[in-house]
Amino acid sequence: MTTGRLSGGQLTVLILALMATGMGQSLVFAILAPLGREVALAELQITSIIAISALVFALASPHWGRLSDRVGRKPIIITGLLGYTVGTLVFTSVFSLGLAGILGGTLLYAVALLARCGQSVVMSATNPATTAYAADNSGPEHRTRTMARLGTANSMGTILGPAVSGALATFGLLAPLYFAAALAASAALLVWRQLPKTPRRERVPRHLRIRLRFTDRRVRHLLATAVGLFVGFSGIQQTLGFTLQDKLALNGIQTAQMTGAALMVSALFTFLVQITVMQRVKLEPGQFIRLGLLAMLCGAAILASADHFPLLALGMAFLGTGLGLTMPSVSAGASLAVSAEEQGSVAGLVAACPAIGFVAGPLCAGALYQIHPTLAPLFSASVFFVVLMLLVQRERRGSAVN
């Protein structure tokens, strides 16, 4: 694979593609809690839609990464964006029928879950192919910085998504979702017209494709860390709307707007960290990861005691800071640990980690929230603490061996 540097045009296209998916996902996260309650779904039903579809995403993502090794990155990126577009339209139409009273109860839940899972199968193609494209075109000395820039793109999307969600929610809870579909379609058109293809000579033939596993000794600690931090983060994120609505006595549209504002605070700090610390401070990926987990632990502890919006926003700022430090470092560390021929495979595994986290996190936090609201952030704090301690112990064992 090529190991030069991404051109400005290539990087811009990749950034815009990831911004589109980041905005779309943050729109869904901001809208789904109040939207689900509007159609009389229970908290656990709402969070399980995210959790089960995330499992589908996690299972599909590595396959798309390996396929991009063989057919090239560009067609896989486009496939994911178009799948996101169509899937969002179908998902939105299901809730439109629910709001109209045509679908309801268990049938509405089942159809919404099926629509979201179908969307997840295809939209999981974009992230691993985009990451692998960047890895193909960046040398080892630039890898961490390049991955941080892609992380910044996703963060920009999650900043803009809640802001757009809050503005568009005044036109109805479904308006932000239609916007997300249009945005993904525009990104697919941009990639098709502007992103150069992977040269045929650099594609990996079918019989030479390398199938990495989550248990690969080179990357398993990084993958486990990413899963753990997203178990904790998704638990907070998916119960955030319930927390705001219940503590501040908000209606559906107000909840969407306040949830969007809180998520925007988190994404803003992720963005700031990635354009400052990650670009200028030279630390090993493992050091960034430990600092990030510590910040997320502080954020979860603050959220457990938050009883008004400013304190809650402070907790989200710590969470955003932690994400900004950890995920680019996980991507860079995994990319540097494998060969050029394995970039698509490892990118698929890394892209699956957040989705795996979103399987357990929302289900556990949603169930605990129904027992007592404080239990959800406390669950996340405990997850961050355990992951951090495991990494510290691993480092100590490595030092002892050396």
Image (cartoon, rainbow, N blue to C red):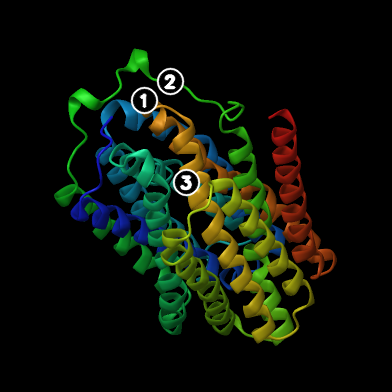
Q: Amino acid at mark 1?
A: Glu
Q: Of the residues shown, which amino acid type is indicated by label 3?
A: Ser
Residue in the image at 43% along x and 20% along y = 210
Circle 3 or circle 1, nearest the eye: 1
Up the image or down, 350 lies above or below 388; here it is above
Mark 3 or 2: in front is: 2
Q: Which residue is mark 3?
A: 120
In this view, the residue in front, 206 or 79, is 206
Q: CA distance from mark 3 to mark 1?
A: 26 Å
Q: Is residue 290 above or below residue 265?
A: above
Question: Sequence order check: which comes first, mark 3 or mark 2?
Answer: 3
The residues tagged by marks 2 and 1 sit, at their Cα atoms, a distance apart of 7 Å
Labels 2 & 1 near each other (Cβ < 8 A): yes
What residue did someone put label 1 on? 341
Where does the image place residue 188, in percent across and percent down from the top left?
25, 52
Secondary structure under tag 2 reads loop
Residue density around tag 3, few if under 14, some if 14–19, many if 20 or more, within 10 Å: many
What residue would you read off at disc 2? Answer: 210
